[in-house]
């Protein structure tokens, strides 16, 4: 950088270093694509343990080959993986939905019946501040809560709007791929629905929402009022009250609710402070119709009688009431000190109702809160929400106990009865219940497949997916890096027949698409032998002509493995081996390096009890030259992986990428250099740049050499890096091209150990 030298002295300049250290990429991040019990459809999610998988995808289930493969991956040393759940969309799998107020449709991100009645949406105005100039809560703004009952998780989206011209438009917030919901999405409204949404004045809160009320309204009825005589002077727009002929210190207290006799609107105000005997300040400015008059009415705080509520729920269509309902709850006993906040009153009501529900309807609970109301004022009301087991979208109703009880009643006083202006809505907008209640206009059920009661597993089209939609295997296009690809459903057995391939699966179609993706992403595909390949003859036919995939970025394995099934009392079950193999590869990479063949006596298959076919040495000798990697069982060592050839590893092919460690080392170097040389782009294309490239790539290759990644005893024998005027001609420079040539001498595994023994004649000294 040029510097202007203006004064005598010392100038310090920082120079750009030619050093750009290259870091090696991870080599054993596995990707699994297939069916899981739950989880987001067609979205790759990263996990670091099987516990993560259990939380996100429901753990091991008998019909999920992927769930077992993931468990086996971590059991054998894997540490990081991506999961893509593929539902059987082509066979009728559907996601649960809920529609409210006709125009809003939300859908579970996980298809199937598991989410039916499990995902709940709540809408409220709690905590929202009034709009400008005292116009009340903005009617287009609301809070959304999404609850996963089974998972015990809750998502909260405050202050979002149904105005699609704003940045906090509900669909934008909820559907955001990074910070949005992991449970639901809002479907795109039709043009007609969007027009109707924009014409809405408010959105219906869930639960029972009472009419506008204040603590003064409640206390004045339940506790009575006391009149403070004298003159209380206050002007419109002021919060300061001046008293004459009375002592505020004697008659009033902080927090009390009062009205002014001279105020025709009878609006209640709360006392914020009393500064002297004749001056007090209110929590809000006076806005009465006239100046305050001669007296102050004070709401008392002690309940003078007993106040009860009748609570009932309507749960299904046709309308029914669960056993144990309705109930009568004594919410305010005689002598109760009534809180001077609506939230405090709500807490007392909640405690009283839940105490009775615990006996009458175990498991059912209510939540009572103070909520804002949309409109022209900052009005508040009581809101009651219920959670009834098996009836998430129940409709709650409040009424007074029968007159025959002889008890005082307060439903009308609290403005919680429909006669007093309360609005009864479903307790929650619940997905997949089939109910239509109040503002819940539809709740379509999720389905596992076209046949009710039968879980359809993903077919070939579901697993491959759509590149444009990033579904199926192409969901991995949004993943930054993965190294090993496992698709256990690609060789899924037919339900009820573990030795036959599922007719909905085309193994070669899936693996052909998968290996093309691996070529693009510099990843490695682990191919399982189909369930009907159970003999050496069958294996020869399959690897020679049945498997239609020939590519260096993949390897095939035989036979299938038998492990204890945790979903069936740990009885032995046959599994595709890709999960075990991926774990073994990860262990070898971490302990020895990607250049070490992930096979041999150290490549132990943890958890494997047996195989569907036990190979002999001669039989292994038939399959190995064909490039089919075998599993063997040896005394002392147990079950091990006994092969390290790629899909082009057959002897007849004589391919340079014959061995797995050679190919995976090359992929590792390619990906590391691809990421580590991006700084080169747009640099001046001349000798200083070429020298810097040689320096940085050479340092990376030297590090690998010192780790034992290459053949050769000296760096010149092990690798070279060439970037100069020979690799990059003037024509290349004119076209903006810089060519870098990197060579390495790979380590190749010792497959055949030959020990020669001969007799010698003893030599006499």
Image (cartoon, helix red, strand yellow):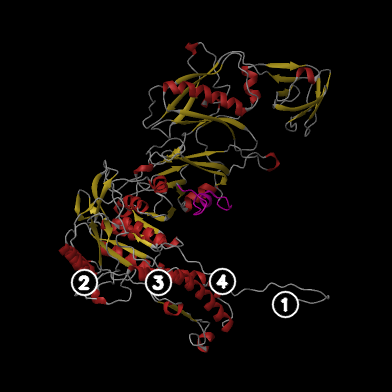
Assess whether mark 4 and mark 1 are in contact (beta carbons under 8 angstroms).
no
Q: CA distance from mark 1 to mark 2?
A: 75 Å
- Compared across the picture, whether 538 is left or right of 106 comes to left
What residue does disc 1 label? 2
Whichever of callouts 3 and 1 sits on the residue coming sooner in the sequence is 1
Q: Residue at 26% x, 58% y: name it.
A: 491
Q: Nearer the viewer, mark 1 or mark 2?
A: 2
Q: Is residue 165 magenta?
A: yes
Whichever of callouts 1 and 2 sits on the residue coming sooner in the sequence is 1
Whichever of callouts 1 and 4 sits on the residue coming sooner in the sequence is 1
Residue 458 visible in this rendered orientation of the protein:
yes
Q: Residue at 77% x, 19% y: name it.
A: 295
Where is 716 relative to 669, above or below?
below
Q: Nearer the viewer, mark 3 or mark 1?
A: 3
Q: Nearer the viewer, mark 2 or mark 3?
A: 2
- Compared across the picture, whether 592 is left or right of 180 comes to left
Q: Position of residue 707 (x, y in %)?
A: 44, 68
* SS category of the residue bearing label 3: helix
Q: Where residue 20 is drawn, which disc sits there? A: 4
Whichever of callouts 2 and 3 sits on the residue coming sooner in the sequence is 3
Q: Position of residue 63 (x, y in %)?
A: 28, 48
Farthest-out residue, front:
765
What residue does disc 3 label? 666
Q: CA distance from mark 4 to mark 2?
A: 53 Å
Give the class, few, some or many, for how many residues have Cα within 10 Å of label 3's Cα (few <14, many ≥20).
some
Whichever of callouts 3 and 4 sits on the residue coming sooner in the sequence is 4
Q: CA distance from mark 1 to mark 4?
A: 23 Å
Assess whether mark 3 and mark 2 are in contact (beta carbons under 8 angstroms).
no
Q: Which residues, given as a range, are shown in magenta? A: 164-182
What residue does disc 2 label? 757
Give the class, few, some or many, for how many residues have Cα within 10 Å of label 2's Cα (few <14, many ≥20).
few
Q: Nearer the viewer, mark 1 or mark 4?
A: 4
């Amino acid at each position: 950088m040029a510097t202007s030298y203006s004064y005598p002295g010392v100038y310090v300049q920082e120079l750009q270093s030619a050093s750009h250290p290259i870091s090696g990429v991870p080599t054993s991040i596995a990707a699994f694509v297939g069916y899981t019990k739950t989880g987001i459809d067609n979205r790759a999610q990263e996990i670091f343990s099987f516990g993560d998988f259990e939380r996100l995808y429901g753990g091991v289930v008998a019909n999920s080959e992927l769930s077992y493969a993931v468990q086996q991956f971590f059991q054998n040393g894997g540490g990081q993986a991506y999961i893509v759940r593929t539902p059987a969309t082509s066979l009728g799998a559907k996601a649960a939905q809920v529609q409210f107020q006709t125009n809003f449709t939300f859908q579970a991100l996980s298809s199937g019946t598991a989410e039916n009645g499990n995902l709940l949406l709540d809408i409220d105005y709690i905590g929202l501040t009034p709009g400008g100039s005292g116009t009340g809560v903005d009617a287009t703004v609301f809070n959304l809560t999404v609850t996963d009952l089974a998972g015990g998780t809750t998502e909260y989206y405050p202050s979002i709007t149904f105005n699609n011209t704003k940045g906090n438009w509900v669909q934008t917030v909820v559907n955001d791929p990074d910070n949005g919901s992991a449970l639901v999405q809002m479907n795109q409204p039709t043009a007609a629905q969007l027009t109707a949404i924009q014409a809405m004045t408010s959105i219906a809160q869930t639960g029972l929402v009472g009419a506008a009320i204040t603590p003064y309204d409640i206390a004045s009825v339940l506790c009575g009022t006391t009149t403070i005589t004298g003159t209380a002077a206050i002007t419109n727009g002021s919060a300061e009250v001046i008293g004459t002929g009375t002592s505020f210190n004697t008659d009033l207290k902080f927090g009390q609710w009062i009205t002014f006799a001279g105020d025709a609107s009878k609006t209640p105000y709360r006392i914020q402070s009393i500064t002297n005997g004749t001056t007090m300040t209110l929590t809000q400015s006076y806005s009465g119709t006239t100046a305050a008059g001669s007296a102050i009415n004070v709401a008392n705080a002690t309940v003078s009688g007993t106040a009860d509520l009748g609570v009932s729920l309507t749960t299904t269509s046709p309308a029914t009431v669960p056993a144990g309902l309705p109930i009568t709850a004594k919410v305010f006993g005689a002598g109760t000190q009534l809180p001077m906040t609506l939230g405090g009153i709500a807490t007392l009501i909640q405690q009283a109702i839940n105490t009775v529900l615990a006996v009458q309807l175990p498991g059912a609970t209510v939540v009572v809160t103070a909520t804002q109301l949309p409109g022209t004022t900052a009005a508040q009301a009581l809101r009651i929400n219920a959670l009834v087991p098996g009836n998430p979208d129940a409709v709650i109703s409040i009424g007074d106990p029968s007159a025959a009880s002889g008890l005082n009643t307060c439903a009308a006083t609290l403005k919680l009865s429909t006669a007093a202006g309360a609005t009864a809505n479903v307790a929650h907008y619940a997905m997949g219940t089939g109910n239509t209640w109040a503002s819940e206009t539809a709740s379509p059920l999720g389905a596992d497949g076209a046949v009710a009661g039968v879980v359809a597993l993903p077919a070939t089209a579901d697993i491959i997916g759509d590149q444009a939609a990033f579904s199926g295997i192409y969901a991995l296009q949004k993943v930054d890096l993965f190294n090993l690809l496992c698709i256990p459903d690609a060789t899924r057995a037919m339900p009820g027949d573990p030795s036959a391939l599922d007719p909905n699966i085309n193994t070669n179609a899936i693996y052909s698409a998968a290996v093309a993706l691996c070529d693009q992403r510099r990843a490695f595909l682990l191919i399982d032998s189909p369930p009907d390949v159970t003999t050496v003859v069958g294996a020869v036919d399959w690897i020679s002509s049945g498997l239609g995939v020939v590519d260096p970025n993949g390897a095939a394995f035989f036979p299938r493995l038998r492990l204890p099934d945790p979903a069936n009392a740990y009885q032995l079950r046959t599994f595709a081996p890709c999960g075990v193999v991926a774990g073994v590869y990860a262990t070898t990479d971490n302990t020895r390096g990607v250049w070490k063949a992930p096979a041999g006596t150290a490549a132990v298959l943890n958890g494997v009890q047996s195989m569907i076919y036990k190979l002999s040495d001669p039989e292994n000798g038939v399959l190995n030259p064909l490039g089919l990697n075998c599993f063997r069982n040896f005394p002392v060592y147990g079950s091990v992986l006994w092969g390290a050839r790629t899909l082009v590893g057959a002897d007849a092919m004589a391919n340079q990428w014959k061995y797995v460690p050679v190919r995976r080392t090359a992929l590792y170097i390619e990906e590391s250099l691809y990421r580590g040389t991006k700084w080169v782009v747009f640099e001046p294309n001349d000798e200083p740049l070429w020298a810097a490239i040689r320096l940085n790539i050479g340092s990376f290759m030297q590090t690998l050499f010192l780790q034992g990644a290459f053949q050769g005893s000296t760096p010149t024998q092990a690798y070279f890096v060439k970037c100069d005027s020979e690799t990059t001609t003037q024509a290349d420079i004119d076209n903006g091209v810089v060519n870098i040539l990197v060579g390495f001498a790979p380590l190749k595994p010792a497959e055949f150990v030959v020990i020669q023994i001969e007799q010698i004649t003893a030599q006499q000294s």
